[in-house]
Image (spheres, grey):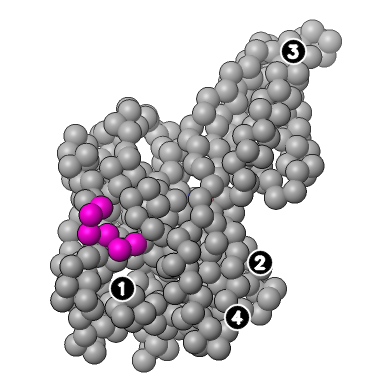
Amino acid sequence: MMNMLAQVVMERCDLLASISEEPDRLTRRFATDAMRRANELAAAWMRDAGMAVRQDNIGNLIGRYYGSGAGTLVLGSHLDTVRDAGRYDGPLGVMVAIACVQALQDQGKQLPFAIEVVAFADEEGLRYGTSYLGSKAYTGTFDPAYLNLCDADGISMREAISAAGGDPDAIPLDKRNRDDLLGYCEVHIEQGPVLEAQGLPGGVVSAIAGQTRATITFRGEAGHAGTVPMSMRRDALTAAAEFVLAVEETARAEPGLVATVGQLAVQPGASNVIPGETTVSLDLRHAEDAIRERALALVYDKAEEIAAKRGVSLTHRLIQENSAMRCDPHLTTLFAEAIVSLGHEPLHLVSGAGHDAVTMSQITPIAMLFVRCKGGVSHNPAESVEVEDVAVAIEVLSRFLRQMSK
Ligand code: HGY
Ligand code: MN
Ligand code: MN
């Protein structure tokens, strides 16, 4: 039966991948019509699995499968994507969770606790730069100041939420009561090469690396590309370019540290104008917060040196910071035992990627199950998983639920 359910999960991920804001690649940002259409599909599948379905003001889709006793175990992941995304980062976790509830319903089974499957509205932060908006609203940690953020088209978060049918001012009322929560468990592709290298279909997550998201802006002087001598320039782009390489050099020098500049905006952005202003994004991660914080200070110092040497000014803005967090030992052990019961080695690994589980850990114990993905490729349309590994994930999660019921 698990193989059949796994086939359905793959088909649903394919269907969701066809729901995009862009015709020739998968991009599904927070509070867009594409998210509305994806939620509509997922809601129908939740109802088919016997769940009562609702959507909260920020756009989280929440399906509830009632149990015979008290308590709720939350399962889920996110349905938003990065730009030009793969089809499994997020949706796989939601579809596997629905498949496990479907299996319970098909067997006419109720667990001694309820299951709540949540499809979070914004894990990636592509539209507004601040990740985990959905799980922050669900956990009551959403900052109302976010509502004033504007996207690349100048649409505020407040306007986007209202246009999507939510009431931005009612978001605090959606805070999930934590008293009945038994935990949060997320199934997700590994987005790394370890499971494939070890020949394992899945693994358990021991911890999730902390991450810092910031922007750094260099301001020089725009000028005529043909008349300003090189010695008299205050070029904001060459300063940024030197900084980008300094970020890479800093990360290469520290084991376990990863640093990425994924965005670079140049003003005024004309080929015959010396750039007057550049803004780069910075994504810094490490499993130990002290090392990440030290690295952040180091790259800021390097930015200051470069700015001073090149006669440009510098500002930086912290967008978001998430501490590293450890997964709950008890829930993680249950996942590991379920993996062993299927005859596989229970590899524990640290997640370099962030997940809604980071936010959920503020209100309830969390655990994550990783699924092998081809070449560890993710945030890339080449993202792929094997249906056999999805079947293993469904079986592991189902056995985990049975263990939780004892
Ligand atoms: O960036 C991340 O770690 C996640 O994919 N949002
Ligand atoms: Mn992602
Ligand atoms: Mn993800």
Task: Name the amino acid type tagged 2.
Answer: Pro
Whether residues under marks 3 and 2 lie with C-beta atoms below 8 angstroms apart, the answer is no
What label sits on residue 154 in the rendered view? none
Marks 3 and 2 sit apart, C-alpha to C-alpha, by 41 Å
Q: Position of residue 251 (x, y in %)?
A: 73, 42
Q: Which residue is mark 4?
A: 345
Marks 4 and 3 sit apart, C-alpha to C-alpha, by 53 Å
Q: Which residue is mark 3?
A: 308
Whether residues under marks 1 and 4 lie with C-beta atoms below 8 angstroms apart, the answer is no
Label 1 secondary element: helix
Q: Which region shows up in magenta?
A: 178-183
Question: Residue at position x 36%, y 91% from top?
Answer: 1
Q: Which residue is mark 1?
A: 98
Q: Nearer the viewer, mark 1 or mark 4?
A: 4
Marks 3 and 1 sit apart, C-alpha to C-alpha, by 55 Å
Of callouts 2 and 1, which one flags the residue occurring earlier in the amino acid sequence?
1
Whether residues under marks 4 and 3 lie with C-beta atoms below 8 angstroms apart, the answer is no
Label 4 secondary element: loop
What label sits on residue 193 in the rendered view? 2
